[in-house]
Amino acid sequence: MGKITVNLDIIMAKRKISSAILAEKIGITPANLSILKTGKAKAIRFSTLEEICRVLECQPGDILEYSKGEDS
Amino acid sequence: MKKRKKSIMVTIVITWALVVFLALLTLTAPWAFKWYSSIFSRGDNVYVPITVAYYVVVIPAFLACINLLKVLYGIKRNSVFTKANVTSLKILTGCCFYVSAVFFIAGFFYFPLFVFSVAAFFASLILLVVKDCFARATEIQIENDLTI
């Protein structure tokens, strides 16, 4: 089964923006942003994705990466 | 909101009353069942199966009450769909099945105990369904909590 990886850390480093500031600009709590960054999130709302792309000036594909799982 | 809090409090009070009743009955069971046997049945031969059956189920009964109170206090704290509550409901179901089995066997010695066995079995089936509902609701809750 495949896996979606959230590469938020990479884009945040490129844009030189901290977690606290990004969370405030997006309108989510730092705790929720941490859940997103660490890959523990089960789902992301389109509204949240839109805000992230707006603040970080990127595309969804820059943040989300799909990788195939190992064949059983 | 107030009605719901009142409803939970009433259920908690009733459950504690049941715990106290069970404690008193545990202390006085031999005399209580002897009195019952002398008044409502043919003779002493039913006092023994009733007393034995009661003492065999009393510990699971207390365990069931404890877990029921755990679930109720959790609901009072707004922690409804949690893994802890699912575990408590699993234990409750197990206790009811156990009580049903014991009364089923005791029913061969004193027929009215079959009624308790059927009632306990019915209760355990309902609890099994409720436990499955809680388990699924807990999954949905976790998924919702982890949706950013």
Image (cartoon, helix red, strand yellow):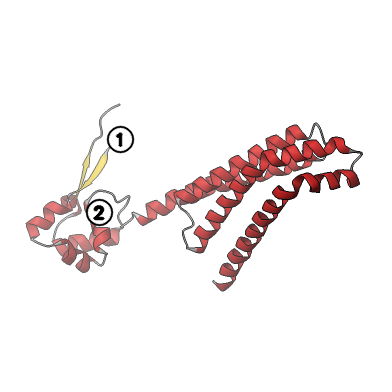
**Where is residue A21 drawn, in percent x and y?**
16, 66
The disc label shown at residue A1, or none: 1
Which class describes the residues within 10 Å of circle 1: few (<14), some (14-19), or many (20+)? few
Q: Are marks 1 and 2 on the same chain?
A: yes
Up-down relation of residue A44 to residue B121 (above or below):
below
The disc label shown at residue A22, or none: none
**Splitting the image into 4 quarters, where does residue B109 fall?**
top right
Please report the residue visible at 45 percent of the width from the left and 48 percent of the height from the top.
B83
Please report the residue visible at 56 percent of the width from the left and 73 percent of the height from the top.
B2
The chain under label 2 reads: A
**Where is residue B94 drawn, in percent x and y?**
59, 40
Judging depth in this view, the residue of B52 and B119 nearest the camera is B52
Please report the residue visible at 26 percent of the width from the left and 60 percent of the height from the top.
A31
The chain under label 1 reads: A
Judging depth in this view, the residue of B47 and B109 nearest the camera is B47
Mark 1 and mark 2: Cα distance apart in space: 20 Å
Which quadrant holds the N terminus of chain B?
bottom right
Identify residue type, mark 1: Met
CB atoms of marks 1 and 2 within 8 Å: no
Helix, strand or loop at label 2? It is: helix
The residue that mark 2 highlights is A36
**Where is residue B78 drawn, in percent x and y?**
47, 62
Up-down relation of residue A69 to residue B137 (above or below):
above
Q: Is residue B42 left or right of residue B86?
A: right
**Where is residue B118 drawn, in percent x and y?**
73, 40
Judging depth in this view, the residue of B19 and B132 nearest the camera is B19
Identify residue type, mark 2: Leu
Please report the residue visible at 7 percent of the width from the left and 56 percent of the height from the top.
A14
